[in-house]
Amino acid sequence: MQPASTNPLPPAARARSLAAAISAMFVVNLVFFLSPPLMAVVLARHGADPAAIGINAAAMAAGTFLVAPFAPAWMGRLGPARVMRWSLLVSVAMLLVMPAWVDPWVWLVPRTILGAAGSLCWIASEAWINALAEETRRGRVMSFYAMAGYSGQALGPLTLLLAGSQGWLPFLVAAGLTLLGAGLVSLGGELRPDLGGSGRPPILRSIVRAPLPMFAVLVQAAAFQAYFSFFPAFGQSLDLPLETAFVLMTCTSLGGLLLQYPMGWLSDRVNRVWLATAWLALGATGAALLPWTTPLGLPAIPFFLFMGAMISGTYALSLVLVGARFRGADLAAAATAFTVVYNIGAMAGPFGAGLVIEATGPGGLSIMMAVALAAVVPIGLWSLRKRIAALYNP
């Protein structure tokens, strides 16, 4: 394994830079998880049909793939902080343009740009944080990043509840929060990692060089998006009240949030490849047990907390493995690949689960999640075998 370079930087300056990036991403996640429900409600109020709303929402995901080929070069030339700041300022402009002309087809362009800008923020922040994190504390640093992201996701809809969905106000609130994110980026001072290099490594090569974290985050995104899309219907098929299903879903998210730091602490003390393999196996087991645990209702809350922790923790641990494997321009390319495969999983998960459910019934959700997570376990075992072989055959 190629270790990440050690940054001989003052601890206070490094901490300030990391805090700036992590706090900015809390705001980014809040805004980008506030936006889809807001825009869907506004379009529906203006007479858009469901198909048009769906196509409009997909435009945000398309932005990721349009910008990905350029992201490593931009980070190498400008640095991750400037990429984030410009992305956030562009997002502000798009948020202020959209309420002036509400139309699903007109909105395709600004929503694609919003998706591209958000993806650049995730790519740049993950590369920035991984480049500055010390190897002995990488897991704990990434746990703070993951907690900030999950907290922002949870508060996005709540912010929309407070701001409402009428007129310009919710868009102005979203734009103001985005400006706050740009300001937080600037608070990091002048300390930013160098993500340049002599060449521009292909993004796809990152997947070949680090298959475990890349495929782990792919199936993590697929399983979680499928779960949050279909679990209410799955619960109702087992005679679970809808309100109870929502409580269990909330507990799944809380498990990832509340146990994130202990899991990051653990990842700094044991073999991370072994840990990722174990979490994938435990997540797959939890998914396979859903038909038996879900009918228990509220008494099953500890199970859902634990399952959520295992699946959510896979995301942060995958980021840790990427940061330990790459540096410089390679890290910029790897962060880009990481975001791309995550988005592929997030889009493919609900689609794949829908096909399985159509073929097998509501229980297909459990089957899809378990099979997807278990499919990456052999990659983890293969990676462990390689490492053990390298120890005995230097």
Image (cartoon, rainbow, N blue to C red):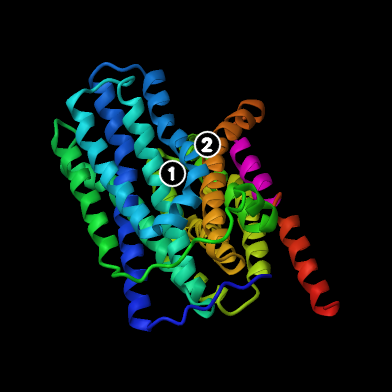
Image quarter of residue 330: bottom right
Q: Residue visible at 37% across and 83% down?
A: 10
Q: Position of residue 192 (x, y in %)?
A: 38, 67
The answer to whether any part of residue 148 appears in the image is yes
Dot 2 corresponds to which residue? 347
Q: Position of residue 219 (x, y in %)?
A: 60, 47
The answer to whether any part of residue 310 appears in the image is no
Vertical order, 1 against 340 (above or below): below
State which quarter of the image contains the C terminus: bottom right
Q: Amino acid at mark 2?
A: Met
- Magenta span has 371? yes
Q: Secondary structure at mark 2?
A: helix
Graded by Cα atoms within 10 Å as few (under 14), some (14 to 19) or many (20 or more), the crowding at tag 1 reads many
Which of the pair 258/119 is nearer the observer?
119
- Magenta span has 345? no
Q: Position of residue 272 (x, y in %)?
A: 63, 70
Q: Secondary structure at mark 1?
A: helix
- What secondary structure prevails in the magenta region? helix
**276 with respect to 10 (left or right):** right
Vertical order, 330 against 137 (above or below): above
Q: Residue visible at 58% across and 69% down?
A: 324
Q: Amino acid at mark 1?
A: Ala
Dot 1 corresponds to which residue? 245
Q: Position of residue 367 (x, y in %)?
A: 65, 41
Q: What range is drawn magenta here?
A: 362-374
Image quarter of residue 345: top right
